[in-house]
Amino acid sequence: VTCFFIDTAHNIVEYIEIIWKILKDGGVWINLGPLLYHFADSYGQNDMSIELSLADVKKVAFHYGFSLERESTIATTYTTNIRSMMQNRYFAAFWTMTKRTGNRPEEHNAE
């Protein structure tokens, strides 16, 4: 489960690869969260940030051998005080993807 997490990466492709590696064949990845990319406005020498669109995130996941089972957009908040005059609302991506049995990313097939 990744909840308000995948956009914390400097390189979201690495996160997807790690998720693929830790799930068993047939395992399910459940995700909920926006794509705010925490390092998008960082300009330091070591502040690289790969910021993919939702469509591109899904393409990378498909490349790694995930199949999309369910997808929707969910309006939600994050650490919001309901008594506050300021509240942030997100239209977060929700999905479940299954790691297809026996599929491996192309770059790992040479092992």
Image (tube, grey):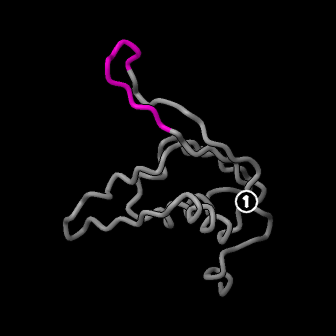
| Residue type of the residue flagged with mark 1 | Lys
Which residue does the image show at 56% across and 65% down from the upper left? 56
Residue located farthest toward the left when viewing the structure as drawn? 44
Q: Is residue 65 left or right of residue 55?
A: right
Check if residue 24 falls in the magenta segment. no
Which residue does the image show at 73% across and 52% down from the upper left? 27
Q: Position of residue 54 (x, y in %)?
A: 55, 57
Q: Main secondary structure of the magenta part?
A: loop
Q: Nearer the viewer, residue 104 or 13?
A: 13
Q: Is residue 55 left or right of residue 25?
A: left
Which residue does the image show at 41% across and 15% down from the upper left? 82
Q: Position of residue 72 (x, y in %)?
A: 66, 43
Identify the residue position indicated by label 1 in the image: 99
Check if residue 83 falls in the magenta segment. yes
Quadrant location of residue 88?
A: top left
What quarter of the picture does the C terminus occupy?
bottom right
Quadrant location of residue 104?
A: bottom right
**How many labels, in total?**
1
Q: Position of residue 43 (x, y in %)?
A: 21, 64
The part of the chain drawn in magenta is: 81-90
Which residue does the image show at 49% across and 66% down from the upper left? 14
Mark 1: few/some/many CA within 10 Å (<14, 14-19, 20+): many
What quarter of the picture does the N terminus occupy?
top right
- Asked which secondary structure carries label 1, the reply is strand
